[in-house]
Image (cartoon, helix red, strand yellow):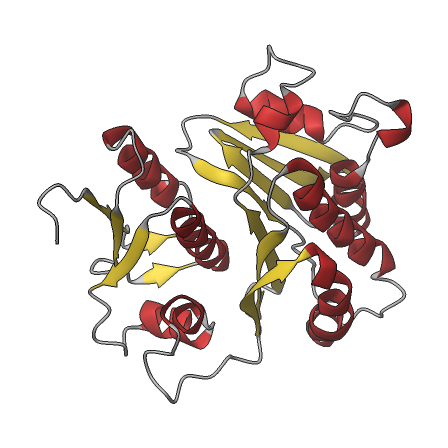
Amino acid sequence: MSAEENIAALLLPSRVVGNNVFVELQTLLVSNPKIPDTVDIDFSRLTFIRSPGIAFLSNFSHWLIDQGAKVTFSNLNPISRPAIKYLDDSLFFEQHLGSKLNISSRCRPTTLPLKQVARSECHAWLEFEFLPWLINHSGLTKTSLAEVTACLKELFNNIDDHTEFETGCVFGQWHPKEKQIIISIADFGQGIPNTVRRVKPELDDTAAIIKAAEDGFSSKSLPTNRGAGLYLLLLNIVQRFCGRVTIRSMGGLVEFDNRNGLIYTTPHTNVGFCIGTMTCPPMVPHS
């Protein structure tokens, strides 16, 4: 190992459930103006992780590798710890280390396994993996989910249109006790705020996310290119299914939920930093 090698550590909080891991990431990036040669993700404190956190960790690891950094994972024992076992069962370590920590680990029936999905593969993934899993746990029909599927296709189109990358990290979890299904899609492109600021340079990160979700807004200059991906996502997930959508990008975080049949927007500040964009749709109530 070179004496000049820059090694940084991301110490995960005990519970990865909200902004805490993004605050830790912001601290890491501020402390290291240049991408470190090696980033060690330290699991020593981790006792609980929600499904969006798994998508974030996977996406962040892929981003670091794309930037030329080496990613290591430390303090994974004992693998019987519930949070570590959940990550192992979700195929996190198989994807990032090449094998599971425990050979007996299996993807749970309630879990849509972690996967990198290219835009060119999204139709097959939606048809043969996502839809059967969602139908099974939501009790909804393929026909009733047609608009949801179209919205997710649009999210993959956005990844291709607005970044130099064509893959997104996807992960899903059905939470029986809460009767909620959470789907997380993350990419490590330039982020929604940077895209929006091509035409609205005055907006901060949170305001840019809200603008991107408006009906008819597009960062593209030609009227024929105006998209409605995020707006349709909110219209279907939030208004039609009374679900909730969370969009996090760079320093911005916005939650959209249903209040009295209308889409209600809740902006957040001081939320840390997110590489690229992470969208969590849908949270579909079980019928």
Q: Is residue 86 visible?
A: yes
**For the C terminus, which image quadrant?**
bottom right
Q: Is residue 261 visible?
A: no
Horizontal arrangement in the rendering, residue 216 relative to residue 185 (left or right): right
Residue 90 image position (x, y, % from top left): 47, 72
Residue 252 image position (x, y, % from top left): 51, 29
**Vertical placement of 243 versus 260: above or below?**
below
Residue in front for this viewpoint, 238 or 55: 55
Horizontal arrangement in the rendering, residue 206 relative to residue 94 (left or right): right
- Residue at the image position 39 percent from the left and 74 percent from the top: 98
- Residue at the image position 21 percent from the left and 44 percent from the top: 8
Numbered-mark total:
0
Residue 53 image position (x, y, % from top left): 44, 54
Residue in front for this viewpoint, 234 or 211: 211
Q: In the figure, residue 182 lies in which quadrant?
A: bottom right
Q: In the figure, residue 194 lies in which quadrant?
A: top right
Residue extending furthest toward the top: 202
- Residue at the image position 70 percent from the left and 28 percent from the top: 212
Residue 187 image position (x, y, % from top left): 56, 47
**For the N terminus, which image quadrant?**
bottom left
Residue extending furthest toward the bottom: 104
Residue extending furthest toward the left: 3
Residue in front for this viewpoint, 193 or 48: 193
Horizontal arrangement in the rendering, residue 193 relative to residue 34 (left or right): right
